[in-house]
Amino acid sequence: MNAEKQIRNEVKPLPIYPSVPPVLGVAGVSGNGQTQLMEVLAGMRHLTAGSINVLGNEVRAASATSPRRIRDLGVGHIPEDRHHHGLVLNFEARENMILGFHESDLTGTGFLMDQAAISSNCQDKMDGFDVRPGNPKLNAKNFSGGNQQKIVIAREFSANPGVLLVGQPTRGVDVGAIEFIHKQLLELRDAGCAILLVSVELDEIMSLSDRIMVLCDGQNVGIVDAADADRQTLGLMMAGQRQEGAAA
Amino acid sequence: MSAPTPPLPRWADLFLLPLINLCAAFLVCGLVVLAIGENPIEAMGVMIQGAFVFPGGLGYTLYYTTNIIFTGLAVATAFHAMMFNIGGEGQATLGGIGAALAAFAFAWAPGIIALPMAILGSALAGALWGVVPGYLQAKRGSHIVITTIMFNFIAASILVWLLAGPLIQAGQSSPQTAPLPDQTWLPKMQDMFSWVGIETARTPFNASFLIALLALFVFWVLIWRTRLGYEIRTVGQNPDAAHYAGINVARVIIIAMAIAGAFAGLLATNEILGSSHKVVNSFTAGYGFTGIAVALMGRNHPIGIFLAALLFGALFQGGAELDFTYKTISREMVLLIQGMIILFSGALAYMFNPPLARLIARMAAGRETAHG
């Protein structure tokens, strides 16, 4: 697929099949097209060519795509930058817990948004994902980085997505929360959700992924099985060197 | 670098800080009054009496307040989407034209149809004047501040053209319309009071005040209770997150500007349907700009906007009284007071924040030690 040309980054046509296997890790030096790839898949950036197949629904370059349409097809998205995209820092936690879902039944079915439902929805998810402090009325900016991330994760995981796009899930997150987030990701995979994981942490990619795709200069250098991957091979691929036997 | 300021408690942020800002503004004005040789306390007394106590004073105060509530809401609605709407003046002008055109068009109809149509006409025409800059901002990237200012001038020109040409009253030469059909007149408050047997002074204060109160309530529901309000606030606080969340940012900006324009347009219900019953040149008299100060001071919240509008309404009326009573104090002095209030509660709004926050934090700490 092609993302619109942005400075020098361009995602070249690449086949990815996140539905098989369950976790596809995307490795690469930061700035080699990961952000563009995620944004195109999430509908935040227009496709200029090709198409995306989402759980049997085809999204073509010509068709008007939007984050809402992609979300309605069952795609969850944990954005790379939670302060920029994932959260509204000046909103209360409970308002952030419905970001992207404010027209779903989480906010009730009446003409006005059901405040009690919004609060209890947030409280449930905060309890379930151990967000501290568990106060739905606290502004998002007053949570620690890890707990902010847990708010985003609680929101996206609870929607039971069929495909989940995960960007930098543990950036700026404390050690305890990292472990918790990894565990949750694997639980979601076991429940049958296909996951596309973008991270600058190579260890994270290697430990969570089933297969690893390497991007360099917006191009798919190759996809390797996580079991066969080692740091050196991946490092060479990140520098643009194609590997024998790696599927392109 | 100084030590970080402790956050201000909510009550202090909402009530104490604006009060201190207000007192500072009055203090400076008092010094000016002193400098020109009058007694500031006495002058203050005259203003308060003129605005609230003298017969008709309160009526005029609330009449001005009504106008300012509408324009304050126009600024605040746009501000929740982080659009700085300077176009209240032009949107209100169009509202007047819309109200008059609807009133003349429904001259044949009974009041029960004609009056709602005239009110609707004011809101729709105002909305139109908000939508165009909103569209230019959302789709073309033309800055809303520039376009709304320019639209004030375009609206003023359209009004002059209409009043000097197509809408001028037959057989006279002053640029104003014929009186609107009287079934489109909103009842005066003194008439409504006299229906229940209470006699009050005759003022232009009329039923549109109730429309203004309703508008404040509608604004609150819209911004904090509807999904559209949620979208408006999300776009205002973080447009990138709004895009991520699947909100159509351009659409929300256009809708927010339409609603803002509609609020400003409703000013015509007070000025034209409620009071003068005809459209005259520059009837908006700067209320659109006062609305900016009011929205700023009222923190874009309906209660704050109401209180700030009341304050400015009282200043308008009390200032006229001041002008009337003192030879040495002119209307310009009232402008000075308004300017000071805008300066202290707008531009310098947070000047007293750090010292006040430190003081409150120290007092709280002191109380804890006393108890511990």
Image (cartoon, coloured by chain):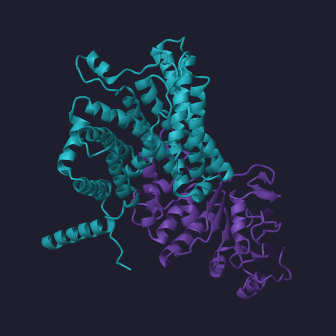
Chain colours: A purple, B cyan
- Residue A207 position within the rendered picture, expressed as x and y whole percent measured from the top left: 64, 78
- Residue B170 position within the rendered picture, expressed as x and y whole percent measured from the top left: 56, 16
Asked whether, in this view, residue A8 is left or right of residue B29, the answer is right
| Residue drawn at x 55%, y 28% as measured from the top left | B97
- Residue B140 position within the rendered picture, expressed as x and y whole percent measured from the top left: 68, 51
Above or below B355: residue A46: above
Q: Nearer the viewer, residue B104 or A153?
A: B104
Asked if one can make out residue A113 in the rendered structure from this viewpoint, the answer is no
Asked whether, in this view, residue B343 is left or right of residue B153, the answer is left
Above or below A20: residue B173: above
Q: Nearer the viewer, residue A39 or A226?
A: A39
Q: From this viewpoint, which residue is outermost toward the left? A: B370
**Numbered marks: total:** 0
Asked whether, in this view, residue B120 is left or right of residue B67, the answer is right
Q: From this viewpoint, which residue is outermost toward the right? A: A244
Q: Nearer the viewer, residue A37 or A18?
A: A37
Q: From this viewpoint, which residue is outermost toward the front? A: B327
| Residue drawn at x 42%, y 29% as measured from the top left | B270
- Residue B342 position within the rendered picture, expressed as x and y whole percent measured from the top left: 38, 53
Above or below A23: residue B336: above
Above or below A89: residue B294: above
| Residue drawn at x 71%, y 86% as measured from the top left | A231
The quarter of the picture where residue B346 lies is bottom left
Q: Which quarter of the rendering shows the N terminus of chain B?
A: bottom left
Asked if one can make out residue B46 in the rendered structure from this viewpoint, the answer is yes
Q: Which quarter of the rendering shows the C terminus of chain B?
A: bottom left
